[in-house]
Image (spheres, grey):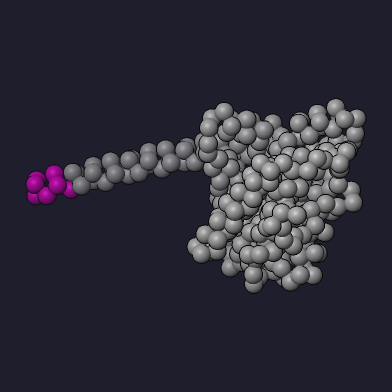
Amino acid sequence: MLPWKRKTLPIFAECSAFYHTLQKPSPLTATEEHDLELAHKRLTTICDKALESNVPVVIDAEDTSIQPGIDYFTYWAAVKYNKGKKPLISGTIQAYLKDAGQRLFETKKAADKMGLPIGFKLVRGAYMSSERKLANSLGVESPVHNSINDTHRCFNECASYMLDEVSSGPGGLILATHNLESGKMAAQKARDLGIGKDSDKLEFASLYGMANAMSFGLRNAGFGVSKYLPFGPVSEIMPYLLRRAEENKGLLSSSNLDRHLMVKELKRRVNACVWQGLAEEESAVKTQAGSIVDVKM
């Protein structure tokens, strides 16, 4: 048992896929244990600084081969640092996974029993191709939903469940989406539940430069909105952005809407400038005519 091992929350559901460990894994080597301890110390340092600065920490998700470890770290940090009604540490649920809804439910209920405010960022997912390829190579069922509509349904149901939960209790929800329908549905339900301008329990998030029309609309409606900007080596960032473009078609449709609204706004501003110019020219002509009349008189 590693010296930092502490109480955490459920990271699996009965329907979760376990084909990554068809055989009992070998014990960690001394080097691996050392690396794991370093990761834990770094997370602790980040959380301590976040607590000191009152800045929330959202831990992202990866593919299913390493996600249980990430969830373990995340929920350990949540148990240690989340106090009161607003979570400092939030984890991420990928709705394109078949067990996403059940894992979200189990984790939330376990947190409730502990009196622990838990936060989730809800995304659709980013590793569809690699997950299906790995499952196929092992001759097992893919952990990813069979259709995009199933993923949409899972995302919306998870969002609806968490909105119900946080509207009357502790916790927080970040909806990371570029999908207009999901955004509208969540915003309407939040309004119906009384979650709005003065609440810090709900936030909408999207990539910087994408789904701007939706972001502005939600912000103008009084909801919390954030834009995130990936940074790092081009060799790592470009595959990340390409996965978003390939596996989140809502992002592309939102971009089309953004472009349409941008062109519309440019035309409005050009027309406004033209009319303003004509008005100024007319005013100048009237002034000049008045001066001429004054001179003749």
Image position, residue 259 (x, y; %) = 56, 35
**Segment colored magenta:** 290-297
Image position, residue 29 (x, y; %) = 72, 41
Residue 129 against residue 265 in the figure, above or below = above
Q: Nearer the viewer, residue 9 or 125?
A: 9
Q: Residue at x 32, y 44 (%)?
A: 279
Image position, residue 157 (x, y; %) = 80, 53
Q: Residue at x 69, y 31 (%)?
A: 246
Left or right: where 74 falls relative to 285: right
Q: Residue at x 8, y 47 (%)?
A: 295
Q: Residue at x 74, y 60 (%)?
A: 8
Q: Mostly what secondary structure, the magenta segment?
A: helix
Q: Nearer the viewer, residue 248 or 50?
A: 50
Image position, residue 209 (x, y; %) = 54, 40
Q: Nearer the viewer, residue 288 or 62?
A: 62
Q: Quadrant of residue 260?
A: top right
Quarter of the image for the N terminus: give it.
bottom right
Q: Quadrant of residue 211?
A: top right
- Residue 169 seen from this side: yes
